[in-house]
Image (tube, helix red, strand yellow):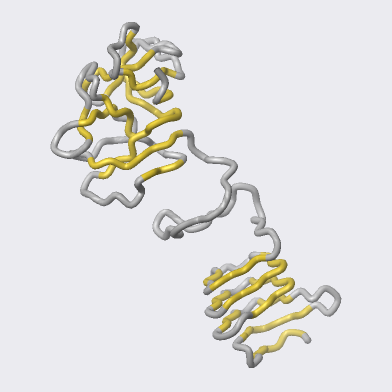
Amino acid sequence: MANQNFVVQNGLTVGPLTIDAATGTITTSGNIVTTGTTVTFVNEVVTGTEAIYGNLTVANVTANATGGLNPGAVTFTGNIVPAGNVSYNIGSSAAWWNTLYGTSTHAQYADLAENYQADRFYNPGTVVMFGGVEEITLATAETTAVAGVVSTNPAHLMNGSLAGTNVIPLALTGRVPCMVIGPVAKGDMMVAAGFGYAKASSTPVLGSVIGKAVQDFPIQAKGVIEVVVGRL
């Protein structure tokens, strides 16, 4: 069967279609649309659009669908493997999946963060404290109410559904970029310096420590270095 329009009564409609008699591979440069019952593919290569409104059971798929796969319910009996390492995403920053069940072995970024309500917008790296008209406000110098550092790219973000005018991700543990006033040496305990910055302290008061410096910043000036938050 080669290069013809293909319609079957179970709701599978395919554009130009090629089936390899030896391997059973289905190849199409057209569109695949299913409208009804469960459809099972053993091997499939798609370069058009695949829209599935019934159920789809797949043993092996080469996922070259340029138009996207829009499934109702999908059951895979094999692995889903991208064509390149760290090349493709599941969802996007504008279109998230809901609950994901599985095991994660790696994270791209380096800190665990949680969303809080702030009294205004604060840039990543800003040192903040508990207080103000909301939950979080700009930290004052050496405050024991220090909350931490606004995360730049959290590896895991908790309280993700929090809504408000100024929701900020607060780094709870891990390494994050932090605005500092030098000099700072690696391993220095960091406390609030005021105005959103951190500074080194050799004798910090209990409750005032943000974390420890990971990098040297040997000049008396303002800059950004990585700090491990949650380390006393």
Q: Which of 50 and 57 is in front in this view?
A: 57
Is residue 226 visible to us here? no
- Residue at the far right: name it: 22
Q: Residue at x 22, y 21 (%)?
A: 194
**Rendered location of residue 210, percent (x, y):** 34, 22
- Residue at the far bottom: name it: 9
Name above or below for residue 204 compared with residue 29.
above
**Rendered location of residue 14, percent (x, y):** 63, 84
Name above or below for residue 105 compared with residue 182.
below
Q: Which of 189 and 65 is in front in this view?
A: 189
Q: In which quarter of the image is the N terminus?
A: bottom right
Q: In which quarter of the image is the C terminus?
A: top left
The image quadrant of residue 4 is bottom right
Is residue 177 visible to us here? yes
Q: Residue at x 33, y 24 (%)?
A: 179
- Residue at the far left: name it: 133
Q: Which residue is drawn at 45% across and 18% down?
A: 215
Q: In this view, does 123 lie to the left or right of 120?
A: right
Q: Nearer the viewer, residue 15 or 118?
A: 118
The image quadrant of residue 225 is top left
**Rendered location of residue 166, percent (x, y):** 23, 44
The image quadrant of residue 68 is bottom right
Name above or below for residue 20 compared with residue 210.
below
Instruction: Tell me how many marks there are.
Output: 0
**Rendered location of residue 131, percent (x, y):** 18, 31
Q: Which residue is drawn at 36% across and 26% down?
A: 178
